[in-house]
């Protein structure tokens, strides 16, 4: 049983104290002679007076971390992906072979944003395939191979990414 806030304990090293905060793994205890200390829930101490209130044993940080992981895994909200500094503010010039036609200049930032959007949408598609209850396992494997080939086709654009851990990886880059 986890102690509630206000419980009094006696710790061999720190002495007498009062539990002032609780998480699933730790008690924050204010000790009379040693001030605030964090001790593990299963640490060795004597319970002088137990308070058994409703205790929220999950910290805000833990909830926030779980929420971030769920959003990243199941939504199409994209992470912030920085472009390599050397490309910022640059342009891409598309010149047709036929010189009578006009060329097109695209800001590289816009192009990079489109590449990142493609990557994010392919990732969402991959997650939907893998979590599908309708597709057979062999179908999932076949579709996953196509997705790996899509990533492989996009590795040319890895030069634009600032962080290599955000690069495209095909079947050869697992």
Image: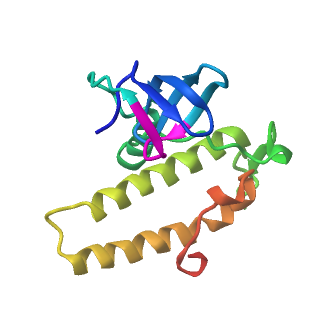
Name the spot of residue 73 as percent of width and height, x first: 40, 49
- Residue at 66 percent across and 22 percent down: it is 33
Q: Nearer the viewer, residue 50 or 94?
A: 50
Considering only vertical position in the picture, is 154 above or below 166? below
User: Tag count in the figure?
Assistant: 0
The one of 24 and 7 positioned closer to us in this rendering: 7
Residue depicted at x 49% and y 68%: 150
Say which quarter of the image contains residue 126. Answer: bottom left
146 on left or right of 81: left
Q: Nearer the viewer, residue 18 or 22?
A: 18
Residue 110 screen position, x and y as percent: 65, 38
Residue 106 visible (yes or no): no
Is residue 152 a member of the stretch shown in magenta?
no
Q: Is residue 139 above or below residue 56?
A: below
Q: Position of residue 137 (x, y in %)?
A: 22, 77
Q: Nearer the viewer, residue 35 or 87?
A: 35
> Splitting the image into 4 quarters, where does residue 135 fall?
bottom left
Magenta segment: 39-47
């Amino acid at each position: 049983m986890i102690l509630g806030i206000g419980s009094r304990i006696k710790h061999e090293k720190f002495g007498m104290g009062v539990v002032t905060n609780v998480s699933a793994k730790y008690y924050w205890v204010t000790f009379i002679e040693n001030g605030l200390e964090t001790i593990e829930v299963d640490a060795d101490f004597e319970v002088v007076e137990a308070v058994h209130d409703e205790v929220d044993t999950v910290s805000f940080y833990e909830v926030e971390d779980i929420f971030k992981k769920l959003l990243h895994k199941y939504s199409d909200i994209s992470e912030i992906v920085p472009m390599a500094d050397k490309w910022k503010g640059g342009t891409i010039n598309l010149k047709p072979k036929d010189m009578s036609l006009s060329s097109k200049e695209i800001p590289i930032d816009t192009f990079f944003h489109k590449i990142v959007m493609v990557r994010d949408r392919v990732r969402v598609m991959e997650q939907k395939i893998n979590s599908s209850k309708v597709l057979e396992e062999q179908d999932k494997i076949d579709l996953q191979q196509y997705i790996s080939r899509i990533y492989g086709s996009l590795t040319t654009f890895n030069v634009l990414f600032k962080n290599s851990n955000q690069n495209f990886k095909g079947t050869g880059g697992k």
